[in-house]
Image: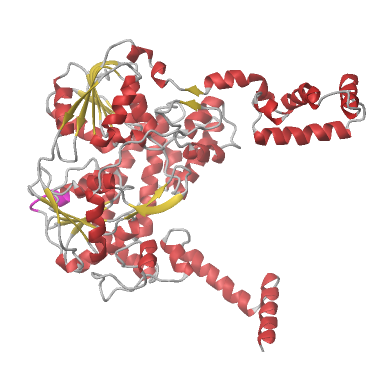
């Protein structure tokens, strides 16, 4: 029966539910239909076969699972085996595909952009707003009118709002119906990304351009070549070598006193960024700070400060956010650790050693061709990490793999996988109780938000609720919600909140391009977002003072160690070389760790301490039982 049912669309879970329901129906109904009564009697008497009951079981199953009647249609909709056929405009032309392959600082993107500037019409598709901004400015500076299109911004250089022949955009925003002479797709190896890879697949298969220039790692060549066979298009490969050399040092830095001008310390957590920058400035050195959640304007301001030969700031502390999108004059890359937290395909958090591809992307920032340092150097902060880094950098880069990932009914060809939809499901669950029509609900669920930020999630919920009431989200409404005007941060907690507010304003702008009538004040919101960017820049410039203020409020919460807590536990409690002797070690209590990881505020911690002290003095309920058990256990021990 289960095998027969599976052919009708009932998987094991649905079959079990239908079986339980059908049995309950048979046993509890007062009067059975005559035909079903006869079938059951025949089976009981040995005159019928169990298969005879199947049509009645399926009729009942379709009553409790109505979608079974349209399973054939669902299978057709879910057949994702030939994505190339989704783009008839692209298939109508014979495109020329050129793969610019090489490591960082090899000039691969430069050559593709030169062709972009020469073309009569062209589109640049990049992974970051910063990169799109860079091409936008470079193109207009070269007297090639170019528009900018990102999820939150539309900038047309024509005063009348007419589209230019060239456009620089984030890859999710590229048009697959507009014809171009040239298209440039940057960082093509990101096609394997579980969450965003769909955007590179769509651009590669769907862009209507006579020439498609893809730029990326050599590890992606075979995969892209194989993928293009499905479209009948050949790939021309142009290989580039690094323009300036970089070497791996034989010695680790070991102590922050050994820093030199042009050094960049790379960390993989925001806590380590705060800790290291605090220690650097405690030695009388000025440093710039760059990490992923900073607004683009703040990142650019910090990069400019570090690059300026007349500025006293000669040290950079950054996350791997420097791997793409910023031109930096770095002499030496110093890996503070080699372990990076990440989220796997199942949406689970995990910590793993960085890959060869990631290590090369970061290490390649040392000794850039356009910088004052013509040769680069790479090393680690800690002596025990150096042989590990050498081993990682000497490995071949893993090729972009062909993976088979099947989701429910979706059928995908071996070259494709279904992207991670955890963020989509997270937002869908959040607004499931809000009455929205299907199109609006879908758009809200595709919004790009940082779900780790509680304030951003709360704002998303309020936006959806206001929208569902058909009440426009005006500028005044937004100002009340974010408590505008805002003041410069007094501590790290304030800075993190300001970054969240910036993300909320980004969300407003993103929605304003999808629902212009309901988010009518995009220009005013953009103005205060620019003001907020300046406020955040002020906070980052004074980051050491903010860290010091945070340390004064929570002495144990912000530790100075140069590695993440997980790595410190793995290596033992021994302090690393380079840790300032006058700094406190990371608090080991649960409360301290929860405060540091942002799961508990200092105010809540103090309140819990008061309540706990009160319960200890006057045990009630469970507390009494616990106290009683403790006394009983003591008696037993005696």
Residue 124 x/y as whole percent: 24, 27
Image quadrant where residue 506 sits: top left
Q: Is residue 444 above or below residue 634?
A: above
521 vs 356, left or right, is: right
Task: Judge whether residue 153 can be spotted in this image.
Answer: yes
Task: Give whichever of 526, 617 is nearer the camera.
Answer: 617
Residue occupying the far top of the picture:
92
Check if residue 417 falls in the magenta segment. Answer: no
Image quadrant where residue 87 sits: top left
105 vs 12, left or right, is: left
Give the color scheme: rainbow, by chain, secondary structure or one colour: secondary structure
Residue 623 x/y as whole percent: 66, 73
Residue 94 x/y as whole percent: 27, 12
Q: Is residue 550 above or below residue 477?
A: below
Task: Judge whether residue 558 can be spotted in this image.
Answer: no
Which quadrant, please, contains the C terminus?
bottom right
Write the start and end of the magenta stretch as one range. 305-310
């Amino acid at each position: 029966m289960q095998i027969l049912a599976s052919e009708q669309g009932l998987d094991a879970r649905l079959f079990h539910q239908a079986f339980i329901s059908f049995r309950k129906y048979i046993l509890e109904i007062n009067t059975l239909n005559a035909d079903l009564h006869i079938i059951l009697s025949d089976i009981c008497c040995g005159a019928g076969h169990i298969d005879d009951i199947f049509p009645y079981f399926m009729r009942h199953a379709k009553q409790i699972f109505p979608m079974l009647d349209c399973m054939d249609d669902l299978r057709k909709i879910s057949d994702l085996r030939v994505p190339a056929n989704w783009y008839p405009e692209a298939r109508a032309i014979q495109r020329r595909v050129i793969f610019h392959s090489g490591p960082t600082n090899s000039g691969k993107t430069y050559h593709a952009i030169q062709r972009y500037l020469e073309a009569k019409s062209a589109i640049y598709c990049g992974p970051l707003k910063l990169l799109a901004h860079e091409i936008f400015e470079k193109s207009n500076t070269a007297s090639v009118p170019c528009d900018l299109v990102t999820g939150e911004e539309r900038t047309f250089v024509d005063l009348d709002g007419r589209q230019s022949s060239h456009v620089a955009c984030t890859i999710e925003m590229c048009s697959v119906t507009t014809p171009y002479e040239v298209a440039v797709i940057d960082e093509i190896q990101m096609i394997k990304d579980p969450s965003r890879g769909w955007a590179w697949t769509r651009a590669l298969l769907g862009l209507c351009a006579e020439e498609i220039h893809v730029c990326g790692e050599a590890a992606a060549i075979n995969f892209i070549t194989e993928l293009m066979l499905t479209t009948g298009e050949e790939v021309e490969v142009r290989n580039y070598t690094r323009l300036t050399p970089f070497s791996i040092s034989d010695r680790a830095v070991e102590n922050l006193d050994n820093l030199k001008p042009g050094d960049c310390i790379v960390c993989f957590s925001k806590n380590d960024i705060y800790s290291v920058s605090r220690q650097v400035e405690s030695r009388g050195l000025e440093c710039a700070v760059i990490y992923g959640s900073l607004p683009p304007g703040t990142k650019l301001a910090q990069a400019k400060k570090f690059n300026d030969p007349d500025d006293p700031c000669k040290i950079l502390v950054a996350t791997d956010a420097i791997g793409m999108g910023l031109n930096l004059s770095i002499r030496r890359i110093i890996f503070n650790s080699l372990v990076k937290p990440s989220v796997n395909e199942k949406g689970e958090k995990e910590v793993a050693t960085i890959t060869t591809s990631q290590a090369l992307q970061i290490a390649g920032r040392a000794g850039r061709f356009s910088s004052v340092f013509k040769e680069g150097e790479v090393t680690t902060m800690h002596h025990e990490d150096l042989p590990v880094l050498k081993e990682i950098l000497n490995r071949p880069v893993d090729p972009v793999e062909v993976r088979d990932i099947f989701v429910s009914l979706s059928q995908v060809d071996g070259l494709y996988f279904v992207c991670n939809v955890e963020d989509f499901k997270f937002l869908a669950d959040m607004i499931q109780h809000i009455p929205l029509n299907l199109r609006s609900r879908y758009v809200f669920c595709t919004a790009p938000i940082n779900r780790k930020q509680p304030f951003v999630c709360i704002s998303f919920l309020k936006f959806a609720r206001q929208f569902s009431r058909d009440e426009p989200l005006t500028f005044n409404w937004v100002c009340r919600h974010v408590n505008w005007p805002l003041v410069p941060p007094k501590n790290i907690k304030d800075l993190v909140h300001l970054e969240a507010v910036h993300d909320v304003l980004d969300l407003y702008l993103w929605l304003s391009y999808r629902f212009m009538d309901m988010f009518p004040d995009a220009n005013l919101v953009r103005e205060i977002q620019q003001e907020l960017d300046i406020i955040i820049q002020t906070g980052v410039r004074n980051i050491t003072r903010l860290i010091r203020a945070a340390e004064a409020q929570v002495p144990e919460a912000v530790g100075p160690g140069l590695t993440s807590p997980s790595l410190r536990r793995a290596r033992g409690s021994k302090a690393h070389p380079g840790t300032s002797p006058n700094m406190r070690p990371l608090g080991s209590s649960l409360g301290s760790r929860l405060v540091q990881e942002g799961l508990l505020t200092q105010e809540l911690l103090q309140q819990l301490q008061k309540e706990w002290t009160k319960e200890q003095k006057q045990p009630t309920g469970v507390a009494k039982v616990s106290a009683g058990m403790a006394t009983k256990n003591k008696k037993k021990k005696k």
